[in-house]
């Protein structure tokens, strides 16, 4: 089941790249495995998937231990409490959900010296009232400036979780608006747009997504 869903999602991504004139292979699939057992991650891995996203630190560390033999690139995508920054800095390659300077400073300070700089995206709240996570567009340029200056962090781009919409054009709007803001910030050489989940990945790819974060479409509904 997981391997056939993985194939379907990858072909959906490939089709969207063609339809929206994106370079082939320019969109990475991040498999969001929160709440799902290590056995499910292993099945996706055996089918070729290498990038996995987790939201809860404790849960992720247990799975990382169980899957220690696998060459997985781990992405942290959930809300970050300051007492979890050390574990995140030590055990992840990417963090998509940085939304304050204090958290970024802790991650930079706690990133072990023997590892490459932590890849970071800033989480932007495109006025999704359902979510308190993420900074506003007004705060974005200043936080970019501050985070880009930290030594053990590589600022890669942005992540956003828009309010769910069924309509394709409405799904595209927040991504389009965020891209316009990013175009004003060339100097940071951001190369990552972490846009799109199971329900809106085609709209996200149409607007330039480089990482789609897919959970339920791959692993099935969560409880
Ligand atoms: C859970 C989650 C996802 C995956 O959502 P699906 O709708 O199941 O694809 C993506 N991004 C973040 C930040 C999440 O928390």
Image (cartoon, helix red, strand yellow):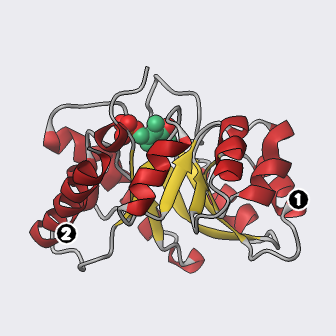
Q: Mark 2 falls on what kind of element?
A: helix
N-terminal of the pair, mark 1 or mark 2, is: 2
Q: Residue at x 24, y 41 (%)?
A: 171
Question: How many neighbours does mark 2 have within 10 angstroms: few (below 14), some (14-19), or many (20 or more)?
Answer: many
Residue named by callout 2: 17
How far across and down, in percent of the image, does residue 18 sit?
13, 72
* Ligand 1 found in image quarter: top left
The disc placed on residue 110 is 1
Q: Residue at x 59, y 75 (%)?
A: 188
Q: Residue at x 86, y 38 (%)?
A: 83
Residue farthest top in this picture? 223
Q: Nearer the viewer, residue 37 or 213?
A: 37
Q: Mark 1 falls on what kind of element?
A: helix
Q: Quadrant of residue 27?
A: bottom left
Residue 162 showing in the rendered view: no
The disc placed on residue 71 is none
Residue 66 showing in the rendered view: yes
Indicate whether 90 appears above or below 57: below
Q: Is residue 139 left or right of residue 23?
A: right
How far across and down, in percent of the image, does residue 166 sit?
18, 31
Q: Is mark 2 within 8 Å of ligand 1?
A: no
- Quadrant in which the C terminus appears: top left
Kindly report the distance in space between the C-alpha atoms of the residues bearing marks 1 and 2: 37 Å
- Quadrant in which the N terminus appears: top left
Q: Nearer the viewer, residue 34 or 192?
A: 34
How far across and down, in percent of the image, does residue 124 sit?
53, 46
């Amino acid at each position: 089941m997981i391997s056939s869903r993985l194939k379907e999602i990858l072909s959906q991504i490939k089709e969207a790249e063609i339809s929206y004139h994106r370079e082939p292979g320019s969109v990475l699939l991040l498999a969001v495995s929160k709440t799902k057992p290590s056995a499910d991650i292993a099945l996706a891995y055996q089918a070729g998937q290498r990038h996995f996203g987790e939201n809860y630190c404790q849960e992720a560390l247990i799975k990382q231990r169980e899957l220690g033999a696998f060459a997985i690139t781990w992405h942290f995508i959930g809300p970050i409490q300051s007492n979890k920054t050390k574990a995140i800095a030590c055990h992840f390659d990417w963090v998509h959900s940085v939304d304050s300077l204090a958290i970024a400073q802790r991650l930079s300070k706690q990133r072990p010296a023997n590892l490459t700089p932590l890849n970071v995206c800033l989480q932007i709240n495109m006025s999704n009232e359902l979510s308190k996570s993420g900074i506003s567009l007004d705060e974005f340029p200043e936080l970019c400036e501050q985070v880009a200056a930290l030594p053990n962090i590589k600022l890669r781009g942005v992540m956003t979780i828009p309010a769910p919409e069924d309509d394709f054009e409405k799904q595209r709007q927040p991504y389009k608006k965020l891209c316009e803001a990013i175009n004003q910030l060339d100097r940071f050489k951001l190369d990552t747009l972490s846009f799109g989940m199971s329900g809106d990945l085609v709209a996200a790819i149409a607007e330039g997504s480089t990482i789609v974060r897919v959970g339920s479409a791959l692993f099935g509904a969560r409880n």
